[in-house]
Image (spheres, rainbow, N blue to C red):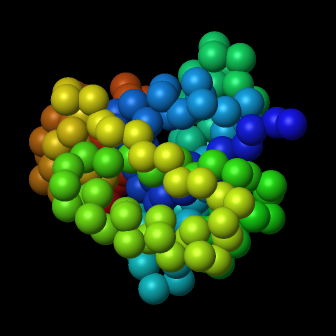
Amino acid sequence: MSRIALYPGSFDPVTNGHLDVVRHAVALCDRLVVAIGIQPSKKPLYSTEERLAMVRSVFAPVAQAAGCGFDCMTYDNLTVTAAQQIGATIMIRGLRDGTDLDYEMQIAGMNETMAPEVHTVFVPASARVRPITATLVRQIAAMGGDVSAFVPAEVASSLKTKFAAG
């Protein structure tokens, strides 16, 4: 039986924190599906297509090097429903700190009630990426700051271009 894991998020943009989680996740499953949540009430910096391309470009080589299958998708329903639809039995969630843990434990408990076959696996962030959030990366980039320590090189270049054009 193949172990399929779903790693959900907005990935707006992909950060080194996300990359850290993926590096750990590919060791836990046979196939990793990164799922970009689409919420009409939110206005992301990157379009859905741009985020899918970014996710593929950054994460697929990591999965391939680990011998793990990889795919990405979008979803606009409950995350646990998206996991069920692809046959995932593992839900990957990154944790930076105790605040993340408190929030994620509540979600994991509710997901377990709705889909007991989907097991949440928490991946603690490595110390070097713990402070990174996509929100802070966007804010720094928007104000002309250097985000190269927080995101993969191609994402840093993309952010520079995006904010130079705006």
Task: Quadrant for the N terminus, please.
Answer: top right
**Viewer-side residue, 153 vs 67:** 67
Q: Is residue 10 left or right of residue 83?
A: left
Q: Is residue 99 above or below residue 24?
A: below
User: In which quarter of the view is residue 160 placed?
Assistant: top left
Give the residue at the far right of this rendering: 1
**Viewer-side residue, 77 vs 28:** 28
User: In which quarter of the view is residue 83 placed?
Assistant: bottom right
Residue 26 is situated, as x and y percent measured from the top left of the image, at 59, 28
**Viewer-side residue, 54 vs 27:** 27
Residue 147 is situated, as x and y percent measured from the top left of the image, at 22, 37
The mark total stands at 0
Residue 120 is situated, as x and y percent measured from the top left of the image, at 53, 54
Residue 143 visible within the image: yes
Residue 161 is situated, as x and y percent measured from the top left of the image, at 36, 43
Q: Is residue 127 above or below residue 13?
A: above
Task: Quadrant for the C terminus, please.
Answer: bottom left
**Viewer-side residue, 34 vs 135:** 34
Q: Is residue 52 above or below residue 37?
A: above
Q: Is residue 161 left or right of residue 143?
A: right
Residue at x 63% of width, y 14% of height: 65
Residue 138 visible within the image: no
Q: Is residue 77 left or right of residue 166?
A: right
Residue at x 25% of width, y 46% of height: 96
Residue at x 20% of width, y 50% of height: 97
Residue at x 27% of width, y 65% of height: 102
Q: Is residue 98 left or right of residue 159?
A: left
Give the residue at the far top of this rendering: 65
Give the residue at the far bottom of this rendering: 41
